[in-house]
């Protein structure tokens, strides 16, 4: 009887396998089909950072479109499902939960904001879903290493240190900092304090402001009354622009520098006539630079997709390129674990002008930092 039972089961199993194969049913990872990969993004399409996000997403979309036109990754086209978190950490966390558990995306891509990205970490860990290229340089995403977070941009602390070094070099040693009162601002403050100590300098002013309801007049008065000759502002575009306009309206000539999260044309436009001379750190090569492979590629693809060149668009472009490289390396049998391992195999990989390095104990990506200044023509000058 046992032999008869086994003889009956084998054909039944073979028949079931045949049905699975012919029905188009797949045992692939969530978000992956034979012809598509579903990627999720929660980001502030509206709110304080809407302008930079629009540019950043346009750069990413241009690269994804190019990949899809050429057949996708191993025959699968990339589908990006974007939801608006209004630059609110609570909404960002809820969006991530929905994208992963309801929409069943394969991975998350390019969140924006430090507290916002922190808010989605628990759902990444519980669902074992990777997040590629969060648009934040906060140290908390670098150390300790989070297995599910792969950074591209350099640390904010490195950007602040670069600014302090530059100011000190040109003789501006009376340096102040204005920072938003959240984890982003706190991270910038750590970089500022460390850099000032290394140059044996004492801050002219250390002041913070509320992220949701900033008291701009108060912050402006504090800077004007201080002895500061140089000022670093750590915050998001809308409030930073208000602070700069307020300072210039009060007649302040303090040299101002802000971070790469404000490296967008929309930020320059929001400053109007007071934009000239403002310094902005950059974590990507110049979008107009065609002396590199990356610059040439960006120029061609951006033009084909009607994307105005900007540093923000370049960040989106490079982030998308990194994700695609990881997907290619993960192979045809795409899984989340496979993507993580593929990304961790990337050591000193040149994307055409930006070099990224990962391992199982390092998810930092790039260390590229440059300083620019807004010129009279409303463009970033290197």
Image: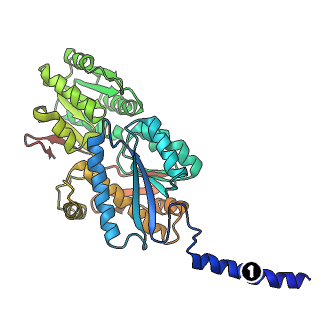
Determine which residue is flagged by label 1.
Answer: 12
Left or right of residue 198, residue 139 in this image: right
Secondary structure beneath dot 1 equals: helix
Q: Identify which residue, 228 or 209, lies in the foreground.
A: 209
x and y percentages locating residue 335 in the rendered image: 53, 64
**Tag 1: Cα neighbours inside 10 Å, few (<14), some, or many (≥20)?**
few
Please name the residue shown 14% across and 40% down the image.
Answer: 374
The N terminus: image quadrant: bottom right
Q: Identify which residue, 293 or 94, lies in the foreground.
A: 94
- Would residue 282 be visible to someone looking at this image? yes
x and y percentages locating residue 66 in the rendered image: 30, 66
Left or right of residue 165, residue 140 in this image: right
**Residue 77: which quarter of the image?**
bottom left
Q: Identify which residue, 49 or 330, lies in the foreground.
A: 49
**Residue 222: which quarter of the image?**
top left
x and y percentages locating residue 271 in the rendered image: 16, 34
């Amino acid at each position: 009887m046992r032999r008869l039972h086994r003889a009956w089961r084998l054909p039944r199993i073979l028949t079931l396998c045949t049905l699975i194969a012919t029905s188009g049913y797949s045992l692939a990872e969530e978000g992956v089909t034979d012809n598509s990969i579903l990627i999720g993004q929660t980001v502030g399409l509206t709110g304080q950072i809407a302008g930079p996000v629009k540019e950043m997403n346009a750069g990413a979309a241009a690269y994804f479109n190019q990949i899809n036109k050429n057949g996708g990754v191993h025959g699968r086209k990339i589908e990006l499902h974007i939801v608006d978190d209004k630059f609110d950490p609570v909404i960002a966390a809820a969006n991530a939960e929905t994208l992963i558990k309801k929409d069943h995306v394969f991975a998350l891509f390019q969140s924006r904001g430090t507290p916002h990205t922190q808010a989605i970490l628990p759902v990444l860990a519980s669902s074992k879903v990777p997040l590629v290229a969060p648009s934040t340089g906060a140290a908390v995403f670098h150390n300790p290493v989070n297995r599910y977070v792969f950074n591209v941009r350099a640390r904010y602390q490195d950007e602040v240190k670069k600014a302090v070094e530059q100011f000190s070099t040109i003789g501006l040693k009376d340096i102040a900092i204005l920072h938003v009162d959240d984890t982003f601002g706190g991270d910038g403050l750590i970089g500022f304090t460390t850099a000032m100590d290394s140059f044996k300098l004492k801050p002219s002013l250390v002041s913070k402001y509320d992220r949701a309801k900033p008291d701009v007049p108060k912050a402006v008065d504090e800077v004007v009354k201080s002895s500061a000759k140089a000022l670093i502002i750590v915050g998001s575009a809308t409030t930073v622009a208000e602070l700069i306009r307020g300072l210039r309206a009060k007649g302040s000539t303090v040299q101002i520098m802000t971070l790469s999260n404000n490296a967008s044309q929309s930020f320059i436009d929001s400053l109007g006539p007071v934009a000239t001379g403002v310094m902005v750190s950059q974590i990507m090569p110049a979008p107009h630079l065609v002396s590199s492979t990356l610059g040439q590629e960006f120029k061609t693809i951006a033009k084909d997709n009607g994307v105005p060149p900007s540093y923000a668009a370049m960040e989106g472009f490079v982030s998308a390129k990194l994700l695609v490289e990881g997907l290619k390396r993960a192979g045809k049998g795409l899984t989340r674990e496979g993507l993580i391992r593929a990304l961790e195999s990337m050591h000193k990989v040149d994307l055409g002008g930006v070099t990224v390095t990962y391992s199982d104990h390092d998810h930092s990506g790039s260390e590229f930092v440059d300083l620019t200044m807004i010129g009279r023509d409303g463009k970033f000058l290197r």
